Image: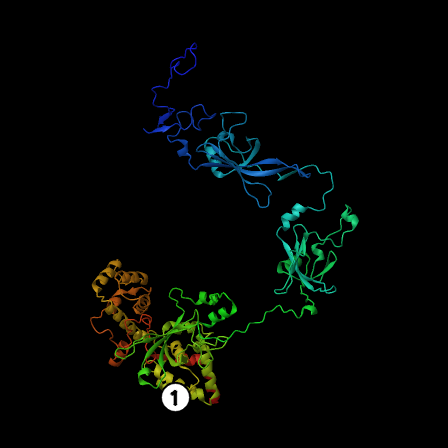
Amino acid sequence: MSVRNPRLPLLPGYGTNPMIGKTSFGVRPVFTTIGKVNMLVDKAEGGNRVPSLYCRKQAPDLPTWIMYDKNILHFQAYFQQSLHEMRSASHILRKVEIFFFLEDGTIKVMEPRTENSGLSQGTLISRQRIRLPFSYDVYYDVLDLNIGREVTFFGKVFKIVNCDNFTRVFMNRLGINVPDPIPWPDAIERAPNTAKPPKHRPFRQFLDFDRQVLRFHGYWDDRETEFGIIHLLEIHYFLADDTIEIKEELPPNSGMEAGPMFLKRMRLPRKIPSHIEMTGGPKCPSYTPADLSIGAVINVFGRKVVLIDCDPFTKEYYRVTYGFDSFTPLPVPKDEGTECISTNVADRKLPPWNGYGSYDDSAENCRTVEPKPPHKDFIKFLHKDRVGFDSHTLRFAARLITDNPEDSTRYFILKYFLCDDTIGIFELGERNSGFKGGKFFRRDKMYLPDVDFFVPKEPPAYTDKDMWVGNEVIINKHRFRLIAADEYALRYLELHADEYPMANIALIMDKIRRTLASQENGYKNFVAKYMEAVLPNKKELMTVRCFKQALKEIMCEKMTEHEFLTLIRHFRGDPGQEKSPRREMIRSLVFSDLTRGLWDDRERLKEALLHADANGLGVLPAPRLRQLLRANRLPINNDLMDCMLQVLKKDDDCNIVYDDLMSFLDFQTRPVYNLSESDYQKVIRHAPPLKDTECKIWSETESVIQEGYVNWNAFLCQLNLEHLVKEQTQ
């Protein structure tokens, strides 16, 4: 570096620039080597008063920002803040938490938040390195923080009183003794009080009763004046500051304009203040909770307001505080002058329905100029909508009641949707019958027959109470008879037997019991006549056909077909056998879909099943089997697949035997084995046509209860009429 000649002027060209020719202008960093890796020095030598926690030659191999990452020393401390606005106290104690970050020696001070403290709490000092008082380059370190010490951060003196377990263990390992915790001092340092204690403590009352309001209902009778009426009022008493506000309640369509407030929030004096009180004299006492009760009359600047009722919180407050038990509301006097003003708007009589749209749509067009969509029963929709496999749809098989022989053989499926009380009817078409099949009536509300449709109010429609086997329904001048129901519909009606009497076994048995008791020697003859009808090898079983004949003889027309079906299902003597026609029906439906989809890949499906069964148990869970069937592209819908999985053989853990599935899908031979030729033709002809996708899930045949057995002994035991035999014998 050249030295400038002082005799030359300080002008360009008269000096030598030492930066000419220099290419690197950065400050050379100081590096160190740790494990043959160059790194920046963590702290410059001589920068801190205590540069390291370890002795010379004993420092760790890793730098502190790696060695002590996320290691924080936690201390509890407090500082005192002067109170200049309170006579009774000179200082207030504020508790804080001090965090010392070991990775870089930074400090953070936080004050825990307290509700309704009135102070700005939270982070008092953000994370940073804090210098020692009266020093420029010396910062606080671990050795400066300990229980019992006072530290000064930016002019505030903090007294450390406690630390957590990690801090105590860490400092003990460094050889630093950590004293026992110091108890917290009093929150407020009281100044010597020479005056008398105040009678009223508003701040304490605010903390104890904040957001607690007593609410009364009352009225002000203003009928003595011209055009005066009875004003309904709502009185709010705020326990936090003993203030009262009053609002007026106006009925709808009263023709009066309500003001913003009858009485704004204030301390309500018991009497109107005099001139002396308003000019600085002694204040008039105001209303307190002890002055308010049902039946009390308060003076609101000359207006007498009568309290007639209160809310539950107010009743509980007076019950706990004053021991009141009686809260009988008082009536409001009738205003004879306003009796002609009716607050209830009469229902508007709508014109008769014109046939366009639904009744609700037409009514909305008549009520408003801008019609809105009609409101549906959303709560019923939430409870009765499809949830997983619970469809909330009742399916019944139906036949047409007609003199036409071609129509009498047609087969229909009636679906009742519980979510909106609509009905849809589909037809199962037969080959070469001349009927296309598919959708017969679209889903809609079906109204009762012989009703007038063109009326203002909607006529009554069919409900779920009309859906039972044996009932006749007339829909659009077509008379249908419900001849059967699927398993879900029967099970749903039985689970909700309190709503459906036809599926209530208790009511049915009571009906049979009353009929037998009313006949002379009825029960005795009934038991004796059909005692020989039981099976010889199993005395407790009787055929379904014989059981049904026995009930028809004693009940005649008093029992419906659905009640017979409920009895047979309840006293079934061979559970499981009634599902064999269902299995063959489902198998025929699956066969129809696989044939239409041109699917014939059983070998690949067999290989996938063996690969999935790694343990060779011969069974697979239903979800895994459903996944494999979808992977092999079986052209059947979800509903039909659910029905197929239900009828397959299962083990004790409800896992499906996949060999039974393979035999179920083996259509090289005749699909139906256990049925006679006539029954086989009856099942095959019910296979749905190509466009009928709604009816594939139908799984019950017309003859559900033609075969099987009933537990005769269980029926007689539940009938419980043995005492009649003894009385009639005596």
- Tell me how the rendering is colored: rainbow
Locate residue 115, reporting x and y percent. 58, 46
Locate residue 300, reporting x and y percent. 72, 57
Which residue matches tag 1?
529
Front residue of this view, candidates 477 and 511: 477
Side (left or right) of 302 relative to 247: right
Q: Classify mark 1: helix, strand or loop.
A: helix
Side (left or right) of 316 relative to 419: right
Residue at 40% x, 76% y: name it: 570
Dot 1, how many residues are within 10 Å of its Cα: few (below 14), some (14-19), or many (20+)? few
**What quarter of the picture does the N terminus occupy?**
top left
Side (left or right) of 703 relative to 335: left
Amino acid type, residue under disc 1 in the picture: Lys
Whether residue 675 is visible to the viewer of this picture, yes or no, is no
Front residue of this view, candidates 602 and 454: 454
Side (left or right) of 239 relative to 481: right
On screen, residue 705 above or below 344? below
Front residue of this view, candidates 581 and 255: 255
Whether residue 119 is visible to the viewer of this picture, yes or no, is yes
Locate residue 642, reporting x and y percent. 32, 67
On screen, residue 164 above or below 475? above
> Residue furthest toward the right?
276
